């Protein structure tokens, strides 16, 4: 895709900046970047692979910013990041054998449920709560499961990690956001490695978008650190609902076919 017009490349960079900003706070950046890549003429596999490359810059930028501010214990999280990386790489490699329509039907329902959880649950703030699952069980069970999903399909991974950290690990919203971006970087890296291995990554466009992602994610992470739950909670709810609507708006979505619309 090196023959793209300059204005198309600039629009892709703009989409990546916005995706990085939103993704660093609430997740869901892929549902901005992937449609933009498809509209630019990339095949679905090229769009997924290139999105993983540019997404590395966004999740890496946000994770680095949160870590520098002391919001993530990198040494403690590193084993779970390795598991997330491996699970995502495996998920990407076996993606073609997974019934994609089942995932596409279930995902909007799950996203709306997550939005309702964060919108209606009282006392959601930046204070840590009681854990429902220990760190070891969380790292061995939850992280690989979500990592595998990220490799197979992708959209909503950040929201799923946020939900797990808040509801199971008992993290406050800001701490959950910081840890989500660190693990999301690892799962992005795993998926990217698998897509790169099969040659479906546009390096030039991915790197251009990656620079814009980095800038957008840096701005988003800084605002999240400044505003905490006041910004994270409403944006997370909005992003989850928007992702569900965006998926259902796709003319090829199985639900639309079932309903005849």
Image: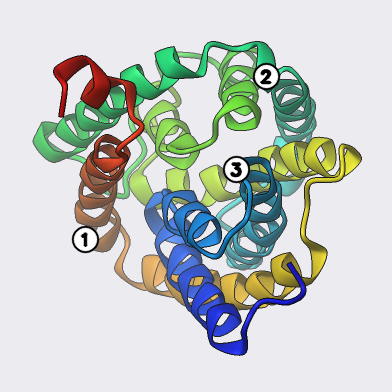
Lower position in the chain sequence, tag 1 or tag 3: 3
Is residue 22 something one can see in this rendering? Answer: yes
162 or 260: nearer the viewer: 260
92 or 115: nearer the viewer: 92
Q: CA distance from mark 1 to mark 3?
A: 36 Å
Look at the numbered disc 2 and give the secondary structure of its residue: helix
Q: Label 3 belongs to which residue?
A: 44
Residue 96 image label: 2
The colour scheme of the drawn protein is rainbow
Q: Label 1 belongs to which residue?
A: 230
Q: Residue at x 77, y 73 (%)?
A: 2
Contact (Cβ within 8 Å) of mark 3 with mark 2: no
Question: In the rendered view, would you say 164 is above or below 190?
Answer: above
Residue 92 placement: quadrant? top right
Lower position in the chain sequence, tag 2 or tag 1: 2
Residue 200 shown left or right of residue 123 in the figure: right
Question: In the rendered view, would you say 218 is above or below 6?
Answer: above
Q: Residue 70: horizontal and vertical position, in percent?
A: 60, 60
78 or 59: nearer the viewer: 59
Residue 22 placement: quadrant? bottom left
- Depth check, mark 1 against mark 3: the one in front is 3
Is residue 109 something one can see in this rendering? Answer: no
Q: Residue at x 64, y 22 (%)?
A: 148
Look at the numbered disc 1 and give the secondary structure of its residue: helix
Q: Residue 179: horizontal and vertical position, in percent?
A: 55, 44
Look at the numbered disc 3 and give the secondary structure of its residue: helix
Q: CA distance from mark 2 to mark 1?
A: 40 Å
Question: In the rendered view, would you say 251 is above or below 93?
Answer: below
């Amino acid at each position: 895709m090196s023959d793209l017009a300059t204005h198309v490349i600039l629009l892709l960079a703009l989409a990546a900046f916005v995706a990085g900003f939103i993704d660093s706070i609430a997740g869901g950046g892929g549902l901005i970047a992937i449609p933009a890549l498809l509209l630019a003429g990339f095949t679905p596999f090229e769009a997924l692979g290139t999105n993983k490359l540019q997404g590395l810059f966004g999740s890496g930028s946000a994770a680095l910013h949160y870590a520098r501010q002391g919001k993530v214990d990198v040494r403690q999280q590193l084993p779970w990041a390795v598991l997330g990386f491996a699970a995502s790489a495996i998920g990407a490699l076996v993606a073609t054998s997974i019934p994609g329509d089942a995932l596409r039907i279930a995902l909007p329902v799950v996203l709306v449920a997550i939005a309702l959880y964060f919108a209606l649950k009282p006392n959601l703030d930046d204070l840590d709560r009681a854990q429902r699952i220990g760190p070891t069980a969380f790292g061995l069970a939850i992280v690989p499961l979500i990592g595998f999903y990220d490799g197979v399909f992708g959209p909503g991974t950040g929201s799923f990690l946020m939900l797990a950290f808040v509801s199971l690990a008992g993290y406050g919203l800001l701490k959950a956001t910081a840890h989500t971006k660190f693990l999301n970087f690892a799962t992005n890296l795993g998926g990217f490695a698998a897509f790169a291995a099969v040659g479906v990554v546009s390096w030039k466009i991915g790197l251009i978008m990656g620079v814009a992602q980095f800038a957008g994610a840096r701005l988003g992470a800084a605002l999240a650190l400044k505003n905490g739950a006041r910004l994270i909670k409403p944006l997370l709810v909005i992003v989850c609902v928007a992702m569900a609507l965006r998926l259902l708006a796709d003319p090829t979505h199985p639900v639309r076919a079932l309903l005849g619309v």
